[in-house]
Image (tube, grey):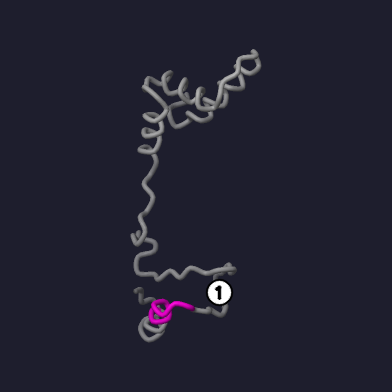
């Protein structure tokens, strides 16, 4: 059974089914029809319901149990694999200080 989280797929299916019968709908029209079929006044209400059903994204600066206490350094043009050794070129003073602090302590210091 489909529910409101499948709204875009439902709208696409509706458009394709009606197209086969020579009935033309725009994408937004099909989204509005699906929203009304699900008992909501319009697509904006349905989109809000879909958004609220998704798990929240972690805000910038937040940590979870997996990354708590582990410093994370963004890398450009490099994919690091376990046990791999690679040079790190640091441009920001703040990042340099964080790396120096980590090396001077337990090698896991964040900042």
Q: Would you say 81 lies left or right of 50 here? A: right
Camera-nearest residue between 8 and 24? 24
* Residue at horizontal 36 percent and vertical 22 percent from the top: 41
Q: Residues within 10 Å of mark 1 (few under 14, many from 20)?
A: few
Number of numbered callouts drawn = 1
Q: Residue 2, relative to residue 75: is it above or below?
A: above
In the rendering, at what x and y percent does residue 95 appear?
42, 77
Horizontally, is 97 left or right of 33 in the view? Answer: left
37 vs 77, left or right, is left
Q: Is residue 74 above or below residue 105?
A: above
Would residue 49 be counted in the magenta stretch?
A: no
Q: Position of residue 21 (x, y in %)?
A: 64, 13
Q: Residue furthest top?
A: 21
The residue that appears at 39% across and 50% down in the rendered structure is 57
Q: Residue furthest bottom?
A: 104
* Residue at 52% in and 25% down: 10
Instruction: Return the x and y of residue 84 as percentages of the image width and height.
Output: 57, 75
Q: Quadrant of the C terminus?
A: bottom left
Name the one closer to the observer, 102 or 1. Answer: 102
* Majority secondary structure of magenta residues: helix
- Write the start and end of the magenta stretch as one range: 91-98
x, y percent for residue 93: 41, 80
| Whether residue 65 is situated above or below residue 70 in the rendered picture | above
Residue beneath disc 1: 83
Q: Where 41 sits versus 8, above or below?
A: above
Q: Secondary structure at mark 1?
A: loop
């Amino acid at each position: 059974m489909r529910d409101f989280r499948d709204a875009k797929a439902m709208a696409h299916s509706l458009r394709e089914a009606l197209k086969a019968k020579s009935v033309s709908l725009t994408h937004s029209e099909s989204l509005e029809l699906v929203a009304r079929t699900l008992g909501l006044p319009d697509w904006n209400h349905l989109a809000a319901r879909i958004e609220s059903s998704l798990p929240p994204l972690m805000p910038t600066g937040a940590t979870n149990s997996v990354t708590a206490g582990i410093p994370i350094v963004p890398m450009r043009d490099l994919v690091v694999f376990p046990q791999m050794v690679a040079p790190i070129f640091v441009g920001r003073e703040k990042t340099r200080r964080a790396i120096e602090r980590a090396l001077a302590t337990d090698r896991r210091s964040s900042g």
